[in-house]
Image (tube, rainbow, N blue to C red):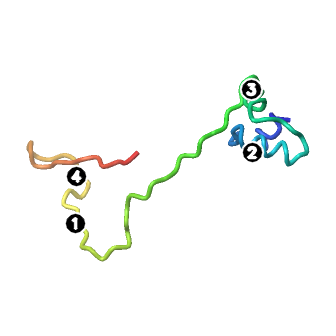
Amino acid sequence: MLQAIHAETGGTYGSPRMVRALRARGLSASKARVERLMRAHGLRGRHRRRDRVTTDSSHRLPVAENLLARDFRPSAPNQVWIADITDL
């Protein structure tokens, strides 16, 4: 039954939601038992990564001009500086 629920939900349910799903189907099991059985069957809930909003595109401030224009080959050293602001 655990494997069926795990497959139906795409592997997202951990033990707390798995217990609620089992009880909704009329089966009684404690959280500790479900944890033990999930571990024995190699079932793990998948964590959802939350996206953080890092950009406010609806502002009225001036936008900086694109001086580089995607020309990443400067003619001499120290003419172009870049940075990576990727937020993980």
Determine which residue is flagged by label 2: 9
The local crowd at label 4, few if under 14, some if 14 to 19, many if 20 or more residues have their Cα within 10 Å, is: few
Residues tagged 4 and 1 counted as in contact (Cβ below 8 A): no
The local crowd at label 1, few if under 14, some if 14 to 19, many if 20 or more residues have their Cα within 10 Å, is: few
Residues tagged 1 and 2 counted as in contact (Cβ below 8 A): no
How far apart marks 1 and 2 lie (CA) works out to 46 Å
Instruction: Say the numbered circle drawn on residue 64.
Output: 1
**Amino acid type assigned to the residue bearing label 2 in the image:** Thr
Q: Is residue 58 above or below residue 66?
A: below
Judge by depth and name the residue closer to the eye, 28 or 10: 28
Which residue is drawn at the image coordinates 43% and 58% (left, top)? 53
Which residue is drawn at the image coordinates 74% and 31% (left, top)? 32
Judge by depth and name the residue closer to the eye, 54 or 69: 54
Determine which residue is flagged by label 3: 36
Judge by depth and name the residue closer to the eye, 39 or 70: 39
Circle nearer the N terminus (2, 3): 2
How far apart marks 4 and 3 lie (CA) works out to 57 Å
The local crowd at label 3, few if under 14, some if 14 to 19, many if 20 or more residues have their Cα within 10 Å, is: few
**Amino acid type assigned to the residue bearing label 3 in the image:** Arg
Front label number (4 vs 3): 3
Residues tagged 4 and 3 counted as in contact (Cβ below 8 A): no
Which residue is drawn at the image coordinates 76% and 38% (left, top)? 6
Picture coordinates of residue 79 (x, y %)? Answer: 10, 49
Residues tagged 2 and 3 counted as in contact (Cβ below 8 A): no
Q: Quarter holding the N terminus? A: top right
Circle nearer the N terminus (3, 1): 3
Circle nearer the N terminus (4, 2): 2
The local crowd at label 2, few if under 14, some if 14 to 19, many if 20 or more residues have their Cα within 10 Å, is: few
**Amino acid type assigned to the residue bearing label 1 in the image:** Ala
Determine which residue is flagged by label 4: 71
Circle nearer the N terminus (1, 2): 2
